[in-house]
Amino acid sequence: MMHAHPVQLGGARPFTRIAVQHFVSISGGKDSQAVLCKLVERIEHKGLEAFGNRVPRFLFADTGHENPITLDHVAYLDDWLRRRVDLPVETVSANDVPGLTDEAAFARKRAMLREEWSKEKRRTHHSGACNRRRNTWQAGAITRAEWMAQCDCPVMVSPPVPDHLIERALELLHPTGIPFLDVAMLHGRFPSTKVRFCTSDTKLIPLMHRKRPLLDGGISVIDWIGERADESAARARKRPIQSVRYPSGALNVLYRPIFRWSAADAFAISARHGLKNNRLYTMGMSRVGCSTCIMVRKRELRMWAMRFPAEVQRVREWERLVGLVSRRTAALGTPASLLAAATVPGDPDDHGRATIDKAIDWSRTGRDGRSYDLLIELEQRQADEDGLLCDSEYGLCE
């Protein structure tokens, strides 16, 4: 049932104030920090009345794949927020959501794995032309038989997986308590640039788990989101304000208050409030979420490997574990790969994917991706001798 309070203004007719809950998603990055500043300014200038007398809530989704520096920065923001407006940053996790990464989810995966791995698997690799004919069939212009009659695409045949590999995978398929690793094990692979379940399973679903009871109860939700149009073409196609209505009548409003801002604008508002930035921005990183993100750039990958060998070792171990519960890699005896072929050119004989060590080797090459760059070798030598210097693509070292 929707909670509402009639309000009388002078001689005007009473109107209904709809109950609304404001949320801000905190990532530890510059853009969510800028949104945090904007909301704090609104609290200080207009009071909680501007939020319908409901205390705004600040949520951080802990994926288990963050750099320790980012976790420290979120703790710093939590301390600043408590001192400034006496409000905390709440931590959410995929582990909070029943059936997402818990033992029940792994039990379903184990049951499915035993059945599927015991059978032969066939998969057709359709060409671009064949995919276009399939689209024509799905549009109803031709029959399925007509599409298949012209399909001579190669078929990959995977034989049944040996029992000892199945048993090994079943022994490993139990929750680790690390959301990112658990969702990768449940999917039997790491996320890709096209299938980014890292975002959905470890961030969006846990965040919505906190909001859905309100929406179902008739309380509208306004999400303050740190997204800017100049980040990518996909984000530029979004709108500053979007909304979805739930059966209860409540609205979930997606509000992007810094949509037209530049990166410099985002840093500027933090500077006005005396807030420090995530130190990763001065270590050659353009992204400060996952360590490292599947969308990582070549030079950024090289700097990450140089600065954070412990993080590299962690990813290496995760690739080994996920490889053992993935049908293809388990049968081949190879690790899975965190970074997709769209990010890092991989081995064509291994479906175009590269393990973290191969990816780091590639990050140390020149533009041809094969020969090692002498300037990069000099960069490494200077780092070994003098330590790594401040490095920021946003000009934070100037």
Image: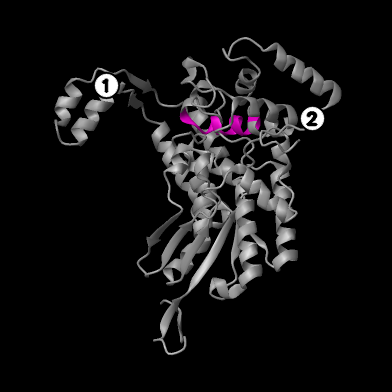
Q: Which mark is residue 104?
A: none
Residue 118 in the figure: left or right of residue 167: left
**Magenta residues, dominant SS class:** helix
Please tell me which residue is depicted at 66% across the width and 68% down the height of the picture. 44
Image quadrant containing the N terminus: bottom left
Residue with the mark numbered 1: 129
Q: Residues within 10 Å of mark 2 (few under 14, many from 20)?
A: few
Element marked by disc 1: helix
Element marked by disc 2: loop
Residue 223, compared with residue 292, is above or below; it is: below
Is residue 64 visible in the rendered structure shown here? no
Q: Which residues are magenta?
A: 316-327
Q: Are marks 2 and 1 in contact (CB under 8 Å)?
A: no
- Name the residue nearer the viewer: 65 or 258: 258
Residue with the mark numbered 2: 389
Image quadrant containing the C terminus: top right
The amino acid sitting under disc 2 is Leu
Could you say where residue 189 lies in the image, as x and y percent from the top left?
50, 34
- Name the residue nearer the viewer: 156 or 1: 1
Determine the residue located farthest toward the front in the rendered image: 11
Could you say where residue 223 lies in the image, as x and y percent from the top left?
51, 59
The amino acid sitting under disc 1 is Ala
Determine the residue located farthest toward the bottom in the rendered image: 11
Between the C-alphas of marks 2 and 1, the distance is 50 Å
Residue 347, compared with residue 54, is above or below; it is: above
Residue 286 in the figure: left or right of residue 188: right
Please tell me which residue is depicted at 64% across the width and 18% down the height of the picture. 361
Please tell me which residue is depicted at 34% across the width and 26% down the height of the picture. 123
Please tell me which residue is depicted at 75% across the width and 19% down the height of the picture. 379
Q: Quadrant of residue 280?
A: top right
